[in-house]
Image (tube, rainbow, N blue to C red):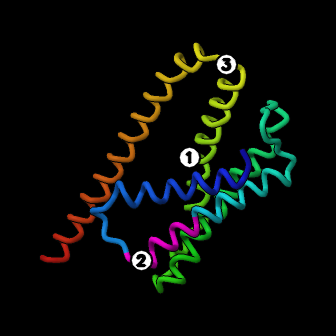
Amino acid sequence: LGPQAMVFVAAAGVAMRLVTEPQRPQSVLRVLLDAVVALVAAFASGWVHQVAGGTLGSFAWPDQGLPIAAAVLAFCAVTSIAAEVIVPLVTKVPLDPSWPSHFINGVPGYVVAAGVAVGIATVSEHRLWQVAVVAAAPLYFAYRAYAASVMRADEERRRKEVCQHLEQGM
């Protein structure tokens, strides 16, 4: 549907985040920055997709591989630079010097999401609904495994923080 539709979806995503996470206290500036980052990243990736020769309406694989990869990298770059450099500068938070590694570590998640999107586009264009049903189970289990690893990492980080806090108190 084009970059305009993608920007609309990004805006809807920001709005849903605000609605579904009301318990998280956020400043108005932070909410606005998050919204602008999402919209600029969506617009940039749509623009890069079109410039790289991406087509709309029909999906021709593997011809669309390069435009999709370029769009994914553009989205990653905009969101990473904005989140790790621009937002801290605007909110007067010290810059994390390891932000380039955060960008590199974030790319696989975006690539997986783009792969799933390509799969969905292919399944829907060719009306291969029986493939979608078979593919849904491994995707669900992959998501559950990822979510479990994130929870474990978060718990480990919290334990380390508590231990550090207790050591400082002694």
Q: Which residue is mark 3?
A: 127
Image quadrant for the C terminus? bottom left
Cα separation, mark 1 vs mark 2, equals 28 Å
Q: Which residue is mark 2?
A: 28
Which numbered marker is on residue 55? none
**Above or below, comparing residue 22 to residue 113 in the picture:** below
Q: Residue at x 54, y 69 (%)?
A: 83
Front residue (pair 10, 115): 10
Image quadrant for the N terminus? top right
Q: Which residue is mark 1?
A: 109
**Above or below, comparing residue 25 to residue 126 in the picture:** below
How packed is label 2: few (under 14 Cα within 10 Å), some, or many (20 or more)?
few
- Kind of residue indicated by mark 1: Gly
**Above or below, comparing residue 159 to residue 89 in the picture:** above
User: x, y percentage for residue 154?
Assistant: 33, 53
Outermost top residue: 130
